């Protein structure tokens, strides 16, 4: 049993949780007032389960908790939030059909005479958004119109409203660019000064070293380390997390880069994607970098037919043959796959099994006369469970019970069953631990050795530099430049990411009316 320290705000003792099998066992942990405690471990190690227990979303099977010296047994997330324990999860708790302002104050909308005071709501929303650097966004904007990164910042802003004593951040920077990350870190420093305690869940070890005072490492549901952050370097932490050593470089294997497979010319849609042209060759990984809002996801959606381009062409093969892509069905028919960044909203049926989710894109192979062959579905799913190293009890387990990283593997596994020549990966390692990332990198290497053409969007610039043959940089919807491996630098890539916005701002300034002398 852990002993609650005098300056502790929260302590958990003997916490365990069992579903079909134990996922947490005997966790003892203390959170001090005003500290940042890093919580890390592989996907499936129990991080999200432990944080959901603290946040009131899950009831522990064993153990007890104390908060500010009192027994703490939240029956719901609302009860935890009322006490000042807030949680920003990977799965955002926002309503896309409501405005940013309405989402921020949904539980406490300012009203007068029974009517919502839009003026007060807007003023309060602007103030809340300024805390996380969202000054440029109109609070009347519908949340569904924002990208995932901006939605995450709105969720963080929502949880900072009112009294907050403990803030749990689950992979908060997974979809943020360097600029937004800096804003978040500044806010964390201010929260600490106010005495707020933070549990910071992340696989980005360099971030943990920067913001955390102590680190707790989970492996297979057990707490294997609770130590000062300064006692460990990244390599030692990785070994604790995965039980084996991993190198800092990856060998993508011998492969041959051939003729162009995908050719994009002049692709445009409104002001999101502007006259973008590039080609991807057989056996090549083409990375797309840029700030949030640069048009990265929008570009992939145009290629996949999820959105319709205003102009431009998409062609396959060499010589290039223009294809008509008016829907995802058209894209899949031409051998183009999209692994979406929003796995929960667009990639998975959470209430269905692993087998059913992997079978979704492969019905012709497992159905007979309109009926699904259960044995065929299970065999297909088991093949991907083994190949992708999906931590699960088997094909029948519900996808909602899997960790975020294992859910992502299910999405990828579905497409691997199809013979697609072009695969579009939008943030493929978002929320995935360092060990599983290398598994996916190896998978990408295998796909290129098969002659596939891969397009990878990632907010992690170092990831793109690690795995890509070329990197194209989008800025303000335009492809600013394309860099070859061994000729790029991180500074050059970052400079290109800002270049489009600087040019746009300069043009706007020139066009602005000037006061006469």
Image: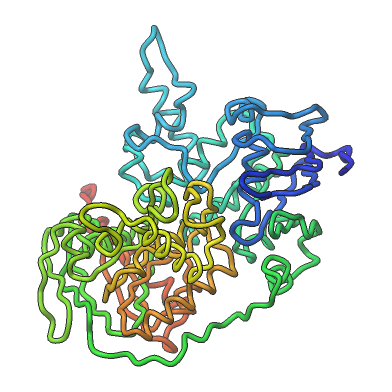
Of residues 48 and 301, the one drawn nearer to the viewer in this rendering:
48
Q: Is residue 164 left or right of residue 516?
A: right
The N terminus - image quarter: top right
Q: Position of residue 371 (x, y in %)?
A: 26, 52
Q: Quadrant of residue 215?
A: bottom right
Furthest residue in direction top, as rendered = 113
What residue is drawn where x is 20% and y is 55%? 369
Q: Position of residue 352 (x, y in %)?
A: 41, 46
Q: Position of residue 360 (x, y in %)?
A: 32, 56
Of residues 351 and 499, the one drawn nearer to the viewer in this rendering:
351
What residue is drawn where x is 64% and y is 30%? 80
- How many numbered marks are there? 0
Of residues 124 and 46, the one drawn nearer to the viewer in this rendering:
46
Residue 203 visible in the shown view: yes
Q: Position of residue 106 (x, y in %)?
A: 44, 26
What residue is drawn where x is 58% and y is 49%? 170
Q: Quadrant of residue 325?
A: bottom left
């Amino acid at each position: 049993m852990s002993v609650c320290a005098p300056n502790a705000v929260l302590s958990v003792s003997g916490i365990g949780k069992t579903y079909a099998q134990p996922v947490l066992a005997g966790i003892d942990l203390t959170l001090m007032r005003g500290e940042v405690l890093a919580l890390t471990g592989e996907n499936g190690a129990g991080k999200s389960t432990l944080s959901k227990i603290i946040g009131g979303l899950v009831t522990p099977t064993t153990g007890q908790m104390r908060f500010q010296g009192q027994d703490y047994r939240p029956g719901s997330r609302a009860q935890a939030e009322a006490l000042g324990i807030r949680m920003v999860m990977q799965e955002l708790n926002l309503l896309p059909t409501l405005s940013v302002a309405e989402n921020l104050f949904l539980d406490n909308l300012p009203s007068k005479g029974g009517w919502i005071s839009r003026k007060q709501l807007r003023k309060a929303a602007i103030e809340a958004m300024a805390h996380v650097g969202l000054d440029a966004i109109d609070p009347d904007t519908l949340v569904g119109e924002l990208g995932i990164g901006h939605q995450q910042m709105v969720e963080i802003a929502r949880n900072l409203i009112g009294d907050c004593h403990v803030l749990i951040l689950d992979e908060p920077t997974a979809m943020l660019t360097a600029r937004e990350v800096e804003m978040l870190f500044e806010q964390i420093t201010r929260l600490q000064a106010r005495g707020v305690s933070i549990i910071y869940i992340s696989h980005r070890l360099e971030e943990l070293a920067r913001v955390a005072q102590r680190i707790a490492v989970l492996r297979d549901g057990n707490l294997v380390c609770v130590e000062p952050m300064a006692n460990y370097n990244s390599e030692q932490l990785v070994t604790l997390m995965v039980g084996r050593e991993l190198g800092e470089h990856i060998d993508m294997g011998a492969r041959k880069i051939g003729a162009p497979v995908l050719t994009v010319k002049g692709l445009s849609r409104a002001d999101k994607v502007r006259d973008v042209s590039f080609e991807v060759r057989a056996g090549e990984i083409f990375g797309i970098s840029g700030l949030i809002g640069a048009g990265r996801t929008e570009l992939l959606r145009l290629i996949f037919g999820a959105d319709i381009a205003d102009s431009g062409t998409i062609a396959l093969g060499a010589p290039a043959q223009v294809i008509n892509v008016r829907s995802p069905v058209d894209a899949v028919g031409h051998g183009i796959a999209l692994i979406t960044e929003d796995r929960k909203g667009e990639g998975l049926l959470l209430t269905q099994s692993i087998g059913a989710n992997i079978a979704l894109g492969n019905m012709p192979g497992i159905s007979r006369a309109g009926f699904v062959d259960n044995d065929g579905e299970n065999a297909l799913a088991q093949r991907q469970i083994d190949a992708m190293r999906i931590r699960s009890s088997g094909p029948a387990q519900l996808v909602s019970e899997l960790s975020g990283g294992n859910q992502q593997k299910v999405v990828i596994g579905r497409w691997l069953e199809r013979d697609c020549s072009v695969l579009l990966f939008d943030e493929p390692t978002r929320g995935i631990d360092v060990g599983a990332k290398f598994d996916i990198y190896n998978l990408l290497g295998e796909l290129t050795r098969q002659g596939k053409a891969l397009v990878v969007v990632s907010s992690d610039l170092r990831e793109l530099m690690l795995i890509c043959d070329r990197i194209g940089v989008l800025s303000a919807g335009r492809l600013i430049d394309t860099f070859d491996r061994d000729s790029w630098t991180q500074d050059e890539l970052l400079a290109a990411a800002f270049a489009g916005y600087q040019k746009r701002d300069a043009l706007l300034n020139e066009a602005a009316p000037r006061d006469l002398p």
